[in-house]
Amino acid sequence: MCGIVGYVGPGADERALDVVMEGLARLEYRGYDSAGVALVNGHEVATAKRAGKLANLRELLAEHPMPPSSTGIGHTRWATHGGPTDQNAHPHRGGTDGKLAVIHNGIIENFHALKSQLLAQGITFTSETDTEVAAQLLAIAYEEAQDLTAAMRQVVNRLEGAFTLLAVHADAPGVVVAARRNSPLVLGLGDGENFLGSDVAAFIGYTRRAVELGQDQIVTITADSAEVIDFAGNPAHGTPFEVTWDAAAAEKNGFPTFMEKEIHEQPHAVADTLLGRSTPQGRLALDEVRIDEADLRAIDKIVIVACGTASYAGMVAKYAIEHWTRIPCEVELAHEFRYRDPVIDERTLVVSISQSGETMDTLMAVKYARQLGARTISICNTHGATIPRESDAVLYTHAGPEIAVASTKAFLAQITACYILGLYLTQLREAQAAADVPEILRELAAIPDKIETLLGRMDRVREIARFMADSRSVLFLGRHVGYPVAMEGALKLKELAYIHAEGFAAGELKHGPIALIDAGQPVFIVVPGPDTPHSLHDKVVSNIQEIRARGARTLVIADEGDDSVAPFADEVITIPQAPPLLSPLLAIVPLQVFACELATAKGLDVDQPRNLAKSVTVE
Ligand code: M6R
């Protein structure tokens, strides 16, 4: 969702526009539909903004160059209040003299009431946004306080909802003031220059020294200083951290798209997430899980909360965690969890899964769970994000920056982290499966090489995808851990190729979905390995026969050496053998490649699919 950049550099330098535009380009992946910048020069604020992609803004800047400056803010907007037009694009100006400019991420929930008050005072508005209300309030507060930080403090205490606000004022050159509540904001510390960003990508080209701002904090940056206070005006501080990846990690490295690159980074995402978390003897050592061991031993229920792809990682995890730990485990979409009356108490462990660590629904679910007394662990890919900070403990996935909007490598890393957590609890509680932990860890350690092998033989999958570019509907069936894989395969195809796709549990077929099958209907079937308990393999092979008899075109994903499926398959895509519970780390790969290739064949932008945002920071 909205991307935010702020910059103050040395007076002589005047490269604010370049720095801000580069930051916005690095934040494009978040998803947006308009963009703009504001620069402070002398005693003026200049703004430029345009609907559409950054290329439109660059065109405008080429036609109407902005004055050189060392202080600037920039914004990519994902429309919420008001359509994606030039007028609604940020920055918004405040005051009759227009000397103040503001950018904003989030939603100001009481903006109607505030706007009515401002209209009654004779203030006019030029956009339909909630942001312009904040701009006008700040301009009024600045008139009174003659200080941008004091004005910000006055205004944020009147706002309800979620927001990151950045403001500049013509009379305060060399200063950017920012505030955050329930929306992301990170500070980047340079030498004689300072940065602000929605995430570290905004300034990764300049510094890796970052500070995670806390909830309800205001930061004032100049070229040489960064001062933090809370909304009450008390001195405060954020949490410093070093970014572990560099600008090169956020480049395409010769791949045509970030999506292709990230699919190929999956062996590393799994290996790096496993790295350093177990002893050579096969015991897990999770120093970062700072929840009291006695509390973890007392847990009698696990609830996983997440959205989208992360929720499918949670569904895979449920099978493994329950099997190993024997603790009941539920998976719930975060936005449903927080609006019902879940049975949660201090013996519940709530595990949130989020690549970005900023998904508003997941964040609110975590806060709600804590209010109810639960212990909370965050599985997250982004250092400095809000969800880990709001949780009792965090288990970071080490997938590296995921730039493509649709998730791939983060999914595999999330599943891996869930396995680690499940095995850790198994070991800690001395569950029956504890003796198997070293062997399961050995099997897990072998997975990255198997993914590498699999990626090396995706030519046929790509051919099938190109051949199917005109498909109108594709179905996905799976059973046991293959069920969430089917759901994720369908989601990838919807997101990337805009094709109707649905994932079903194969056992559900005869309860309705089989009515969808007619001549030529393509159906992917994720077949459980022959070792999967309860003859599930044979049951799914029967399902393949049932749909084939009704005309379906069957595209079967099966273990190498599983010859039983060939007679009933139009295509067999084989994956290396792995223990059934770990097989999702392999089975999803051909489905990701299929969706990516099909969308590419349709000429679609696989990195930034229409209407989607990378991190959904509003409800
Ligand atoms: O950042 P998060 O993992 O919390 O994001 C959750 C979902 O919004 C995300 O997985 C979404 O479904 C992606 N578009 C999937 O490709």
Image: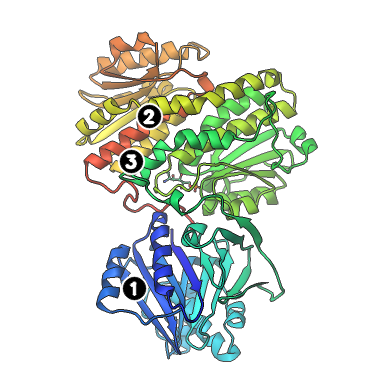
Q: Give the amino acid at mark 3.
A: Lys
Looking at the picture, how far across and down is residue 571, in whole percent? 27, 19
Between 165 and 221, the one nearer to me in the picture: 221
Q: Say which label, 2 or 3, has the lower sequence index.
A: 2
Q: Residue at x 70, y 69 (%)?
A: 236
Neighbour tally class for label 2: few under 14, some 14-19, many 20 plus, Cα within 10 Å: some
Q: Nearer the viewer, mark 2 or mark 3?
A: 2
Q: Please name the colour scheme applied to the rendered image.
A: rainbow
Examine the rendering and report whether any part of residue 115 can be seen: no
Between 23 and 477, the one nearer to me in the picture: 23
Secondary structure beneath label 2: helix
Left or right of residue 291: residue 448 = left
Q: Say which label, 2 or 1, has the lower sequence index.
A: 1
Task: Say which residue label 3 marks.
Answer: 494
Question: Alpha-carbon distance for marks 1 and 3?
Answer: 31 Å
Q: Residue at x 56, y 31 (%)?
A: 317
Q: Give the amino acid at mark 1.
A: Lys
Looking at the picture, how far across and down is residue 95, in whole percent? 46, 87
Question: Alpha-carbon distance for marks 2 and 1?
Answer: 42 Å
Task: Say which residue label 2 marks.
Answer: 455
Task: Say which residue label 1 marks.
Answer: 49
Between 512 and 504, the one nearer to me in the picture: 504
Residue 158, quarter of picture: bottom right
Examine the rendering and report whether any part of residue 233 can be seen: yes
| Residue farthest to the right, as pictured | 294
Q: Say which label, 1 or 3, has the lower sequence index.
A: 1
